[in-house]
Image: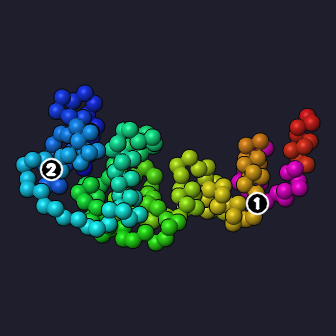
């Protein structure tokens, strides 16, 4: 498992953890071509879980890549922010699968409950795209009636168009109470008169 990219390192370009736990250094090309299968200090036992091409295994590979592979396009949003994968999951796919189980459906992918937390059993779950969209750290949260939700969630719950909520908050600088209490027709007139001024 690659745990660090060591640019310019004479021993190789990747710091890796062998299945036996030893730390070793490998060249990127060797890893890609599957030349190096162990640290050389242990006897490699050819074991397989038989799940290499499953969505669960792809999710596990993706999680490790986004946290430790600096060449991944969006590395800055995970590893670059200090997000890590717990030691138990780094150790093996079997541990990850034991903790997370089967993906519920093709519409689910791995997601973190706390976007600032690491990938581990306590902070991860299988999520739908809607759940992930509502859990983005860039979302604007609105508290109304002692309940905090995203604009999309409020739109769905109260039947107010997303663009209307955004306009009321940004252009008209309304409070959450005004956003959801004032009828749409009134704010349209209010906005029109405001622009004429």
Q: Position of residue 81 (x, y in %)?
A: 41, 41
Judged by depth in the image, the label closer to the viewer, 1 or 2, is 2
User: On screen, 148 above or below 25?
Assistant: below
Looking at the image, residue 40 sits to the left or right of residue 104; the answer is left
The magenta stretch is 172-188
Residue at 61% x, 49% y: name it.
140
| Circle 1 SS class | loop
**Rounded to the nearest whole Å, what is the CA distance between mark 1 and mark 2?**
58 Å
Residue at 58% x, 61% y: name it.
130
Dot 2, crowdedness within 10 Å: few (<14), some or many (≥20)?
Answer: some
Hey, which quadrant is residue 73 in on the image? Answer: top left
Give the overall secondary structure of the magenta segment.
helix
**Which of 125/38 is in front?**
38
Total numbered badges shown on the rendered structure? 2
Q: Is residue 148 visible?
A: no
**Which of 77/52 is in front?**
52
Residue picked out by circle 2: 38
Residue at 16% x, 62% y: name it.
46
Q: Is residue 65 visible?
A: yes
Give the colour scheme shown: rainbow
Quick one: quadrant of the C terminus? Answer: top right
Residue picked out by circle 1: 160
């Amino acid at each position: 498992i690659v745990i660090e990219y060591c640019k310019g390192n004479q021993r190789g370009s990747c710091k890796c953890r062998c299945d036996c736990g030893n730390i070793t250094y490998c060249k990127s090309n060797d890893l890609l071509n599957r030349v190096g299968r162990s640290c050389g200090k242990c006897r490699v036992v050819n074991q397989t879980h038989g799940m290499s091409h499953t969505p669960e295994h792809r999710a596990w590979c993706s999680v490790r890549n986004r946290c430790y592979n600096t060449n991944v396009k969006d590395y800055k949003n995970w590893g670059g922010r200090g997000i890590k994968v717990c030691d138990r999951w780094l150790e093996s796919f079997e541990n990850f699968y034991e903790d997370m189980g089967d993906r519920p459906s093709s519409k689910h992918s791995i997601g973190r409950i706390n976007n600032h937390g690491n990938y581990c059993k306590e902070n991860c779950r299988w999520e739908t795209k809607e759940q992930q969209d509502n859990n983005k750290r860039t979302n604007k949260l609105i508290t109304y009636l002692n309940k905090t939700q995203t604009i999309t969630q409020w739109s769905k719950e109260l039947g107010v168009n997303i663009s209307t909520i955004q306009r009321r908050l940004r252009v008209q600088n309304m409070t959450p109470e005004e956003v959801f209490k004032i009828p749409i027709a009134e704010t349209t007139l209010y906005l029109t008169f405001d622009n004429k001024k």
